[in-house]
Image (cartoon, grey):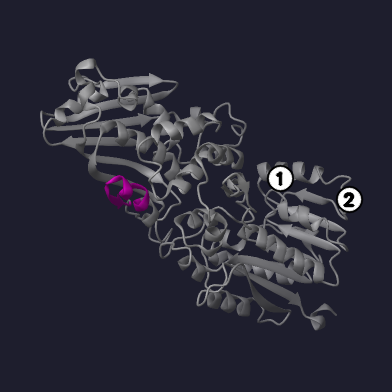
Amino acid sequence: MHLILKASGADAGVVSRLLAKNPLNIYDRVDKGVRVRMVYTTATENETEVLIHAEPDPVDLVRGTPDGYDITQYINDREFVTSSLFCSYIRGALGTALNGKPKEGYAQWVGHSFELELTFGPVASDLPDRVVEELFSPLGYAVSMERGELSYSFDLKNKSTVRHITLRGRNTVQHALRQLFLLIPVLDNYKHYFISEDEIDKIKRYGEGWLDAHPLKELIVKRTLRFAELIRQYERQEGALSASLGQERETGHTSDTVIQENNVGHQEDREQDQRESESVSDGVQSEPPVRLNELRYRAITDVVSALPVKRSIVDMGAGEGKLSARLAYVPGVESILAVEPSGQSRLRAMERFAKLEGRSGVVAMPEPIIGSLFYFDEQMQNQDIMILCEVIEHIEEYRLNRIMDTIMNEYQPEVLLVTTPNKEYNEVYAMEQESFRHHDHRFEWTRAELAIRCEEWTQQGSYGYEIKGIGENAEGYGQPTQLVIFERRKESQS
């Protein structure tokens, strides 16, 4: 992970004084297992270029954490990508520049704008290139991005989310660094520390002089604060972020809509819940917008409620149990298997289900169990209903036919409900072509592509199917989510 700051033009040599680092010396420090180095590759009167590099210990990144026992915690990109971790590593080295307090003789240069070139990366971001550019271009930068070449002989991903970013434009060194320290974590959408009220102060401090006028201020604030209560607290202090927030999120006409949609789904909805905030205007609290994830749950619950037989349900890929908890209130349901391979998600589901005890209207307590579509489990045979809500797009396409064959010919539920994104609707969200709504999606299908696959899966005649849409309809694009209702034919039951 690195940052290269280059200043050129008259008096560019003063930049080393603003950074408070001697070009003739190599800054090399190790603190808490992280090695930070600053090296001047050019240091003349009219040009300064400095490389800032951080190299953490990957084991120390997870040692002592709640999930440190899990070997998968050691398989991540945190030691490589430029993120909030990187910003915290180099903050000590750049403290003088960030605070704008060089030696007295150079204080006049703090407000001086230089011709700057800032190169940093690699950045792992779920934001499309268009939104990345919209984050920096209002600050006066020309933005360019590069992706590394993949040497694989197969199509691993159509377009990597990892990019190196270069910014060129006039700016003060202090403003440039403060903008990066605020926007790099926004790009990465990850914070390695507990997010508290201090984060609001940081937004105000680093965003002073530029954030209020930024067209993507709402996106920046929400990805920085993440939690609904902190966002509401910020709005109480600084005013509403958006007066038409609810409408924008549903119609998909803002860049923020891309972010909202990227973080919804049956398996990845925890962060989405943390971000939910209500629109506040003139001290009056309006109704919160209806999330697409909420619409999915409502649609599935409505279908289940209308079925004549619904005693036993399998919620496959149940995540933290939100859908299973809703189904617990449906009259006629007697058992719910909440199947999830992630241990952490099952623990959260157990906490959620425990709160259902003794509640009025609960007719069945969901049972969290470990399981996967890749392994046969006789517990799932001959159930009334099986649900795959936002699950299939997380599986490689070449494995799906085998999985659907197992479900329809081995498990044989009376009804199978499947939801998956409608790829055509991504254009309504102004997403880049071939980009996905979530970083873990292996594919997304158009309405026609889904219909073709449903025909293939039901060609043996055991099941019939009906495809419906969920969410707001857009002319020519359909609805954002596709719902398939597979029903086992009567003759195949005998």
Mark in front: 1 vs 2? 2
Secondary structure beneath disc 2? loop
Side of 277 where 94 appears, left or right: left
Drawn side of residue 139 relative to residue 355, left or right: left
Q: Amino acid at mark 1?
A: Arg
Q: Which is nearer the eye, 14 or 39?
A: 14
Q: Report if residue 138 lies within the magenta region.
A: yes
Q: Is residue 369 magenta-colored?
A: no
Q: Secondary structure at mark 1?
A: helix
At 61% from the left and 39% from the top, the residue drawn is 229
**Where residue 294 is drawn, which disc sits there?**
none
The residue sitting at 17% across, 20% down in the picture is: 24
In primary-sequence order, the first of circles 1 and 2 is: 1
Residue assigned mark 2: 360
- Three-letter residue code for mark 2: Ser
Where 200 falls versus 359 (above or below)?
A: above
Residue extent of the magenta highlight: 133-147
Q: Position of residue 383 (x, y in %)?
A: 81, 65
Q: Are marks 1 and 2 in contact (CB under 8 Å)?
A: no
Q: Which residue is mark 1?
A: 346
x then y, percent, for residue 16: 21, 25
Q: Residues within 10 Å of mark 1 (few under 14, many from 20)?
A: many
